[in-house]
Image: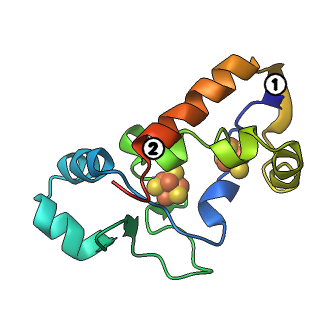
């Protein structure tokens, strides 16, 4: 598999779906924004017993996406920093190819070692932002 994120592209921030956060993501982003965790959560987070996600209505782009890109780029959620090496994409060639239809970085750049891709996917499995 080949991948190289394309400069100026933000298509993955504009897809239908949710951005799930780990507890570490919540703490890191709240600190970066200079907000207490309760204030950050009230403003940006939807939390249930089994998940935390940004309050993003479906079909609306991420609240942190600004005209010049991700406004929390240096502290962005694990889900964002590991894309496209998510377990469901690394483990399934057809899903990888399907994602490559809208992510212009897939299929470009140097070959990515499968062990390296699997290791990134494993960080998502270990963090399990859907059930911590
Ligand atoms: S859609 Fe792909 S190329 Fe574009 S910013 Fe996201 S990962 Fe990078
Ligand atoms: S947090 Fe940043 S990288 Fe993640 S979807 Fe939102 S704008 Fe994109």
The label shown at residue 109 is 1
Q: CA distance from mark 1 to mark 2?
A: 22 Å
The label shown at residue 81 is none
Toward the viewer: 120 or 8? 120
Q: Residues within 10 Å of mark 2 (few under 14, many from 20)?
A: some
Which residue lies at the image location 41% right of the left edge and 42% below the top edge?
127
| Residue 18 in sight here | yes
**Where is 50 relative to 90, above or below?**
below
Q: Nearer the viewer, mark 1 or mark 2?
A: 2
Which residue lies at the image location 59% right of the left edge and 59% below the top edge?
13
Residue 66: x %, y % from top left:
50, 61
Left or right for 99, reference 45? right
**Where is 34 relative to 67, above or below?**
above
Which residue lies at the image location 78% right of the left edge and 50% below the top edge?
103
Q: Residues within 10 Å of mark 1 (few under 14, many from 20)?
A: few
Tell me where residue 110 sits by quadrant.
top right
Residue 68: x %, y % from top left:
54, 53
Toward the viewer: 31 or 117? 117
Toward the viewer: 10 or 89? 89
Left or right for 132, reference 95? left
Which residue lies at the image location 84% right of the left edge and 28% below the top edge?
1
Residue 6: x %, y % from top left:
73, 39
| Residue 69 in sight here | no
* SS type, badge 2: helix
The label shown at residue 78 is 2
Question: Tags 1 and 2 in contact by the CB under 8 Å rule?
Answer: no
Residue 86: x %, y % from top left:
63, 43
Image quarter (top left, top right, bottom left or bottom right) of the C terminus: bottom left
First in residue order: circle 1 vs circle 2:
2
* SS type, badge 1: strand
């Amino acid at each position: 598999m080949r991948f190289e994120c394309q400069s100026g592209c933000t298509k993955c921030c504009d897809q239908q779906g949710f951005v799930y956060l780990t507890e570490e993501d919540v703490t890191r982003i709240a600190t970066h924004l200079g907000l207490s965790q309760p204030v950050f959560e009230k403003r940006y987070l939807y939390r249930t017993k089994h998940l935390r996600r940004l309050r993003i209505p479906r079909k609306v782009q991420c609240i942190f996406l600004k005209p010049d890109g991700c406004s929390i780029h240096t502290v962005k959620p694990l889900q964002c920093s590991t894309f496209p090496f998510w377990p469901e994409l690394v483990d399934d060639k057809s899903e990888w190819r399907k994602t490559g239809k809208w992510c212009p970085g897939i299929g470009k750049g140097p070959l990515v070692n499968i062990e390296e891709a699997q290791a990134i996917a494993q960080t998502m499995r270990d963090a399990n932002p859907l059930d911590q």
